[in-house]
Image (spheres, rainbow, N blue to C red):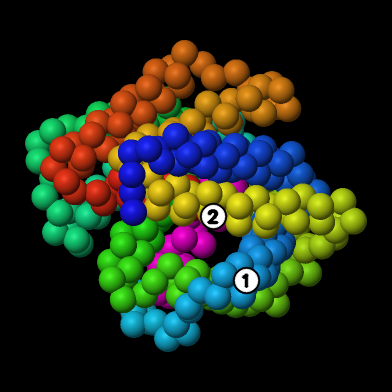
C-alpha cells in the first residue's frame, strides 16, 4: 500500500538505482575496447537470473511458468533486447549524459503508444509537452543534415524500443505477474544470446579495419575474460539491485513522486563522464536536456491530475 510517509524511502531507493545505472554505463564505456557487447549481455543476464532465482527461492514468491501472452512476451523481450543493444552501443562514442538524456525521450514514446494501444486519453497539454520534449531531443542532437551522424539517433531508437516493450509489459501485467514476466525475460534473452554466440561468438565476423564500436559488437567473446569478469559480475549484481530498488520504490511510495527522481541519472552520468572521460556538456546540450526533463515532468504532472499513470508507472530504466 502506497503512503506519503514512505516517499522519502522511495526517493532514496530510486537514487540508489540511478547511481548503479550511472556506474554501469560508465564502466561499459571504460571496458568496451577489451570486451564484446553480447558477452556483457550474457554475463549480466546470467548473474541477474541467478540472483532472481535465489530471491524467489528465499522469499517463496509464486512464479507461474505459463504466460497468458506467449507472442507478446516474445515481442516484449526482443524489443527490450534491441533497446539496450542500441543504448550500450551508443555509449562507445557518445558522452554518457547525452546518451542518457536522449534515452529519456522514452516517456514521450510511452505516452504516444499508450494513446493508440492502451486507448489512454491524451489532451492538447500533454501533446504539447511531447512536442516540447522532442524539441529538446532535436537541440541535443544538433543535426547538420549535410553531414549528420545518424548513429547519434541510437539512444532515441533505444528509447522507442524500450517504450514499446514497457507498454506491452503494462498490457500483459493484468494476467502475468512481475515474476512470470522476469522469468520469460531472462529465459528468452539468454536463449537469444546463446544463438548469437553460436553465430558470431568466436569473432568470425570481426575485421581488423573495423572502428572501436564495430569491434565491440563483433569481437570474440571472453577473449580477455581475466580482465572483464569482475566488471560483468558487477553489471549483473548492479542490475539486480537496481531493479529491486526501483520495484520496491514504486510499491512503497507514490509513483508520481519517485518517478521524477529518475532524472537524477542524467546528472549522475555527468560525474563519471567528467572524471573518467573528460566529458563536459555544451550549453546547447544542457538546454536540450532542460527541455527533455521539463517535458517529462509535465507529462507526469498531467497524469497525476487526470489520474492516469501509464508513463508515471513505467520506470525509465529497468
The tag on residue 244 is: 2
Question: Percent from the top left, x then y, of residue 260?
Answer: 37, 34
How would you classify the magenta stretch by its main secondary structure? Answer: helix
Task: Report the residue at 34% width, 79% height from top.
Answer: 69
- Is residue 278 found left or right of 167 in the rendered image? right
85 falls in the magenta region: yes
The image quarter containing residue 36 is bottom right
128 falls in the magenta region: no
* Mark 2, secondary structure of its residue: helix
Is residue 193 among what the camera can see? no
Task: Report the residue at 35% width, 30% height from top.
Answer: 292
Image height of 225 relative to 93, above or below = below
- Is residue 36 found left or right of 78 in the rendered image? right
Decide which of tag 2 and tag 1 comes sooner along the chain: 1
Q: Which residue is mark 1?
A: 58
Question: Percent from the top left, x then y, of residue 159?
Answer: 41, 47
Front position in the image: 304 or 251:
251
- Quarter placement of the N terminus: bottom left
Of discs 2 and 1, which sits in the foreground? Answer: 1
Q: Calculate the distance from the C-alpha at mark 2 to the C-alpha at mark 1.
A: 14 Å
Task: Report the residue at 23% width, 34% height from top.
Answer: 301
Question: Percent from the top left, x then y, of residue 288?
Answer: 39, 23
Image height of 135 relative to 104, above or below = above
* Mark 1, secondary structure of its residue: helix
Which residues are the magenta region? 73-92
How many C-alpha atoms fall within 10 Å of the one at disc 2: few (<14), some, or many (≥20)?
some
Front position in the image: 310 or 209:
310
Task: Report the residue at 51% width, 62% height from top.
Answer: 81
The image quarter containing residue 64 is bottom left
Question: Percent from the top left, x then y, of residue 148?
Answer: 46, 33
Amino acid at each position: 500500500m502506497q503512503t506519503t510517509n514512505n516517499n522519502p524511502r522511495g526517493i532514496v531507493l530510486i537514487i540508489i538505482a540511478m547511481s548503479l545505472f550511472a556506474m554501469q554505463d560508465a564502466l561499459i564505456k571504460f571496458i568496451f575496447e577489451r570486451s564484446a557487447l553480447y558477452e556483457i549481455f550474457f554475463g549480466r543476464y546470467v548473474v541477474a537470473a541467478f540472483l532472481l532465482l535465489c530471491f524467489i527461492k528465499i522469499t517463496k514468491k509464486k512464479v507461474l511458468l505459463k504466460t497468458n501472452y506467449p507472442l507478446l512476451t516474445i515481442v516484449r523481450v526482443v524489443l527490450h533486447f534491441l533497446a539496450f543493444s542500441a543504448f550500450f552501443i551508443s555509449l562507445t562514442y557518445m558522452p554518457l549524459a547525452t546518451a542518457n538524456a536522449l534515452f529519456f525521450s522514452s516517456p514521450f514514446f510511452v505516452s504516444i503508444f499508450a494513446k493508440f494501444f492502451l486507448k489512454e486519453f491524451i489532451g492538447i497539454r500533454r501533446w504539447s509537452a511531447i512536442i516540447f520534449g522532442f524539441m529538446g531531443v532535436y537541440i541535443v542532437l544538433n543535426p547538420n543534415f549535410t553531414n549528420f551522424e545518424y548513429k547519434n539517433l541510437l539512444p532515441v531508437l533505444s528509447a522507442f524500443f524500450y517504450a514499446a516493450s514497457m507498454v506491452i509489459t503494462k498490457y500483459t501485467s493484468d494476467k502475468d505477474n512481475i515474476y512470470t514476466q522476469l522469468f520469460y525475460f531472462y529465459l528468452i534473452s539468454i536463449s537469444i544470446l546463446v544463438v548469437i554466440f553460436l553465430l558470431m561468438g568466436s569473432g568470425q565476423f570481426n575485421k581488423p579495419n573495423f572502428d572501436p564500436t564495430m569491434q565491440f559488437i563483433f569481437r570474440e567473446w571472453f577473449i580477455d575474460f581475466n580482465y572483464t569478469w569482475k566488471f560483468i559480475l558487477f553489471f549483473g549484481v548492479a542490475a539486480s539491485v537496481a531493479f529491486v530498488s526501483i520495484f520496491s520504490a514504486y510499491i512503497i511510495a507514490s509513483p508520481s513522486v519517485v518517478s521524477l527522481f529518475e532524472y537524477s541519472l542524467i546528472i549522475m552520468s555527468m560525474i563519471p563522464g567528467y572524471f573518467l572521460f573528460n566529458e563536459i556538456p555544451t550549453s546547447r546540450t544542457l538546454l536540450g536536456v532542460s527541455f527533455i526533463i521539463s517535458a517529462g515532468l509535465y507529462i507526469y504532472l498531467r497524469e497525476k491530475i487526470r489520474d492516469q499513470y501509464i508513463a508515471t508507472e513505467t520506470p525509465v530504466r529497468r
